[in-house]
Image (tube, rainbow, N blue to C red):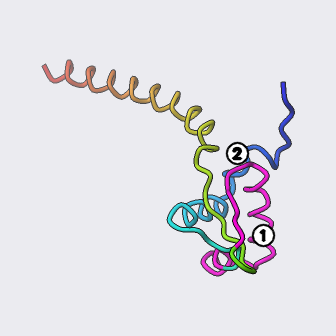
Amino acid sequence: MTYVAPHQDAFKAIADPNRRKMLDMMLQDACTVGALADALAISQPTASQHMQVLRLAGLVDERKEGRRTLYTVRAAQLRSVADWIAKYEAFWTDRLDALDAHLARMKT
């Protein structure tokens, strides 16, 4: 089994609400750390720390444009999170379907 440091785990990376907001913003368009910091009303060093966590988790790509570094979401890396959540979606869908069937039987 490969050891994954906490800061490299996609689940831990998206646990923070500011990092989730950053991912949402980068999904729309490439962003600089400064733009993310301004939009979230956080300091640039704090935004850089969040970005470091996202980079180490493999959730963002970066590209240089002159002196600026632009970041975009690497959505494929979120597949492990989506796969894990899918199990619970199926569970709740089955439960809600059973509830619907039960309620329908109670009406008749």
Residue at 84%, 24% (x, y): give it.
1
Q: For mark 2, what is the residue?
A: 10
Residue 84, compared with residue 41, is above or below; it is above
Horizontal and vertical percent position of residue 2: 84, 29
Q: Which residue is mark 1?
A: 48
Dot 1 amino acid type = Ser
Which element carries disc 2, helix, strand or loop? helix
Q: What kind of secondary structure does the magenta stretch mostly adopt?
A: helix
Find the distance from the CA under tag 1 to the CA under tag 2: 17 Å
Q: Residue at x 60, y 78 (%)?
A: 39
Q: Nearer the viewer, residue 100 or 63?
A: 63
Q: Amino acid at mark 2?
A: Ala
Question: Where are the magenta residues, as a range?
Answer: 35-64
Instruction: Residue at the far front: name it.
Output: 66
Q: Position of residue 94 (x, y in %)?
A: 39, 23
Of callouts 1 and 2, the N-terminal one = 2
The verdict on residue 4 being magenta is no
Q: Of residues 29 and 22, which is closer to you in this image?
A: 29
